[in-house]
């Protein structure tokens, strides 16, 4: 198990380093002090003011064969089950932003060096001219 976790952590570190140059437009994952993330996925949020939308980036990545998923559980107040529960929602500005502007792609022990380089290449190709 420890080897799987370390491989996923090394993948996340690789993507963080490779995609850091786009941090004006992309919010990348980080670990809080005294925590250790196991990274079953690599989450990305498109920042306000980016010259593209989440959907444009996701569509491009999907066209290259990189499967992505939205971060669905971010805004529980819009989930269908919540229609059956009485609850009070206050300011959900950040939750709504994550729901509309974030996605992830999976990390697993089978991702090779060539595959991780290809993924970074997809981001580089998309970002050209932005």
Image (cartoon, rainbow, N blue to C red):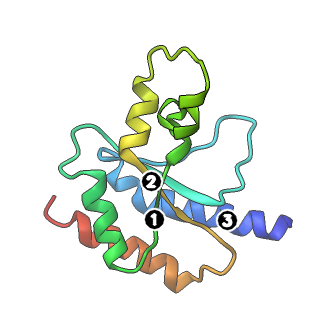
Q: Residue at x 46, y 71 (%)?
A: 67
Q: Helix or strand or loop: what does disc 1 sit on?
A: loop
> Looking at the image, do the residues carrying marks 1 and 2 touch, with CB atoms under 8 Å apart?
yes
9 w.r.t. 51: above or below: below
Element type where label 3 sits in the image: helix
87 or 101, which lies in front? 87
* Mark linked to residue 68: 1
Which is nearer the N-term, disc 1 or disc 3? 3
Compared to residue 7, the image places residue 36 above or below, namely above
- Which residue shows up at 40% across the image and 24% down it? 93
At 16% from the left and 58% from the top, the residue drawn is 130
Q: Are marks 1 and 3 in contact (CB under 8 Å)?
A: no
Answer few, some or many: residues within 10 Å of disc 1's Cα (few below 14, many 20 plus, some between 14 and 19): some
In screen coordinates, is 7 left or right of 67? right
Q: Which dot marks residue 127?
A: none
What's the distance in space between the residues labelled 2 and 3, CA to CA? 18 Å
Q: Would you identify the image quadrant in which residue 113 lies?
A: bottom right
The numbered mark, 1 or 2, whose residue comes first in the sequence reads: 1
Of 83 and 105, the residue lying toward us: 83
Q: Which mark is residue 8?
A: 3
Q: Residue at x 27, y 37 (%)?
A: 48
Residue 88 against residue 78 in the figure, above or below? above
Measured as percent of width and height from the top left, residue 71 is found at 50, 49
Q: Which residue is mark 2?
A: 103
Residue count near mark 3 (Cα–Cα under 10 Å), binned few <14, some 14–19, many ≥20: many
């Amino acid at each position: 198990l420890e080897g799987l976790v370390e491989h996923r952590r090394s993948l996340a570190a690789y993507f963080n380093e490779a995609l850091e140059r786009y941090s004006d437009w992309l919010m990348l994952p980080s670990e809080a002090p005294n925590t250790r993330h196991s990274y079953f996925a690599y989450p990305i949020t498109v920042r306000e003011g980016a010259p593209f939308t989440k959907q444009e980036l996701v569509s491009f990545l999907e066209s290259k064969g990189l499967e992505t998923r939205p971060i669905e559980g971010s805004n529980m107040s819009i989930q269908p089950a919540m229609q059956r529960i009485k609850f009070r929602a206050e300011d959900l500005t950040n939750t709504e932003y994550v729901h509309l502007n974030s996605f992830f792609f999976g990390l697993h022990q089978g991702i090779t060096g060539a595959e991780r380089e290809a993924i970074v290449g997809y981001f580089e190709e998309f970002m050209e001219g932005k």
